[in-house]
Every structure is written in structure tokens, then in C-alpha cells.
Amino acid sequence: MSDTDGLSPRLRQDLFERLGKKRKQILWTGIGMAVIGAAAIIFPLVFSLSITLLVGWLFIIAGAVSLYGAFSYHGTGPFFGALLLSLLQIVAGFFIVFNPASGLVALTMMVAIVFMIEGAFKMMLAFDMRPEEGWGWTMVSALISIIAGVLIAAGLPGSSAIVLGLFMGVSFLSTGIFMIMVARRFKAK
């Protein structure tokens, strides 16, 4: 069997047994993802700005924790690097919180990259699942994620105010549908 043939029959059977045992969790996660995705599509600007502010505050908190931790290195070589990194995180966080439009553009580009990587991983999963039921939905979800990432990157910076929320919504919705379809493949026996 070559590396391009996907999973061996034994590994495939093990994968499907594990997924079957987690059917309800997969189903409810899919429903939740679909609901969040629909809300983001309906309110893209709110979703975009909320994400931007959340990331800004996370940078501030992470920077503060890192700053505290940097002093455990005091007197050693890594101290100044840790101190500089933590201060950079705090400054980046305040920049994003107080300049959400600029932060939104940077976050939008990062999301574009994440979507493309996510799509690549979903595509590998789709090929591993093939020809089982649900593999087509996995491939559709992969292609949507990749296309969304490319479209997000192509529309910067002008469209970042709504594109982030809109495409995050589309990705969450398609992922939710994918998870619901995978869960349906493993109906209770």
C-alpha cells in the first residue's frame, strides 16, 4: 500500500469506531458551530470587532503573565528576552484594543492563513475517509475553508471590517454542517 492510498483498513476501522463512540458530542458540537456561524453571518461587523477586542485583551493578559514570569529569569541570560517579549505582547494588545481597525486588518490576514491551513487538514481527512459516507462533505468544507482564506487575503485592507466576521461565520457554519453529517453517518445501532 502506498502513502497516497490513505489509512490502512485497520486504522480506518479504528477511526470509525472512535468517531462512532463520540457521535453525540460530534453532533452537538456541529450544531453549536452552525448556530455560531449563522450568527456571525447575520452580524459580521459585531463578530469582527468582538474578535479583535478579545485578541487585544488576550495579548495584554498574556503579556502581563509573561512579564511576571520574566522575573523568574532575573539574573540569567533569558531575562531580557522574556522581558522584551512580554512588553511587546502588552504593547501589541493595547495597540489592538485602542486601534481596532488596524488590529482588525492584521487579524484578518492571520485568519486567512489559518483558514487555508485548516482547509488543507480537512482535505487530508476527506481523502482518508474516502469512500465512506460523509467524505464529500468533508471535502466541501475543506474547499470552503481554503477559498475563504484566499478571498480574505485578496480583499485586504478595505474589506476587513465585515469580511472577518462573514467568512468566520461561513467557515463555522460549514464546519458545523460537516460535523453534523459525520455524526449522522454513525447513527445509533
Image (cartoon, grey):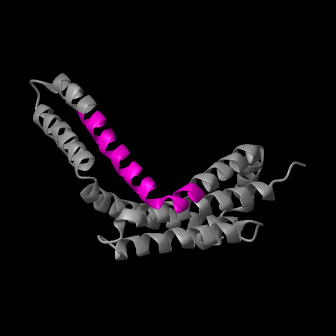
The residue at the point 52 percent across, 68 percent down is 145
Q: Is residue 86 above or below residue 105?
A: above
Q: Quadrant of the N terminus?
A: bottom right
- Where does residue 104 sit, x and y in percent of width and height? 31, 58
By secondary structure, the bulk of the magenta-drawn segment is best described as helix
Residue situated in front as seen by the camera: 46 or 2: 46
180 horizontally vs 33: left or right: right
The residue furthest right is 189
- Where does residue 115 sit, x and y in percent of width and height? 46, 64
Residue situated in front as seen by the camera: 75 or 91: 91
159 horizontally vs 178: left or right: left
- The answer to which quarter of the image holds residue 171 is bottom right
Residue situated in front as seen by the camera: 119 or 155: 155
Res. 121 in view:
no
- Where does residue 130 sit, x and y in percent of width and height? 71, 70
The residue at the point 20 percent across, 30 percent down is 67
Total count of labels: 0
The stretch in magenta equals 37-63
- The answer to which quarter of the image holds residue 85 is top left
- Where does residue 13 sit, x and y in percent of width and height? 76, 55
Q: Is residue 87 above or below residue 150?
A: above
The residue at the point 48 percent across, 71 percent down is 148
Is-magenta flag for residue 131? no
Res. 74 in view:
yes
Is-magenta flag for residue 42? yes
